[in-house]
Image: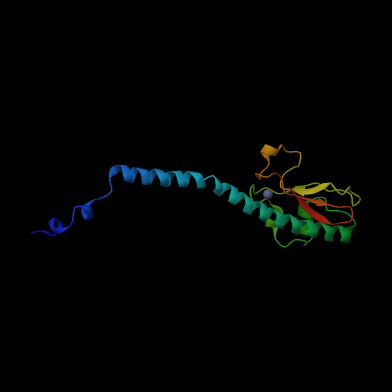
Amino acid sequence: MNATARLPQRARRAFTLIELLVVIAMISILIAMTMPMIPAVNDQARIGTCESRQQQVGVALRLFAEDHHAYPKSLNELYAGHYLDQRSLLRCDKTGREYYYRPAPLTAKPEEVLLACVDPATATGKRPHRHGTVSVLLHANGEATLTR
Ligand SMILES: [Zn+2]
């Protein structure tokens, strides 16, 4: 007498093809639901990186302005003057391109954008980050704030 013959009928029952297909379909649906979230999470992390970099560049711009009584003509001037220790701080984490920078007089209006991931005139759909451009606003009193 062999071992399988002694087992009750229910214990030998395996998954049917339909049950297996249902499980595969459910796993596929779960994967399909979570996949679109991955780029959004990545973009959120990159926005955080850009915010941090631009805040550091904003501080460097203020220091430069205090020393020279004017903002630098280019971001390279900021780096060459040793106001920043890493050149990578001048690039958007998503595009890899240097930040948009527009020197303004020290008397610039508070809402003027000096630094951003891309030119703020770029259409919203063509900006690098899903939630728009991360940019530093330099206020007339010298304070730097971030906006999206
Ligand atoms: Zn960016």
Q: Position of residue 82 (x, y in %)?
A: 77, 62
**Residue found 22% across the figure and 53% down from its top:** 10
Residue 142 located left or right of residue 39:
right
Q: Position of residue 116 (x, y in %)?
A: 74, 48
Q: Quadrant of residue 59?
A: bottom right
Residue 124 located left or right of residue 5:
right
The quarter of the image holding the N terminus is bottom left
**Residue found 69% across the figure and 52% down from its top:** 91
Q: Residue furthest left?
A: 1
Residue 133 located left or right of residue 15:
right
Q: Quadrant of residue 131?
A: top right
Residue 85 located left or right of residue 114:
left
**Residue found 22% across the figure and 55% down from its top:** 11
**Residue found 76% across the figure and 38% down from its top:** 121
Q: How is the image coloured?
A: rainbow
Q: Position of residue 144 (x, y in %)?
A: 81, 55
Q: Quadrant of residue 87?
A: bottom right
Q: How many marks?
A: 0
Q: Position of residue 76 (x, y in %)?
A: 76, 53
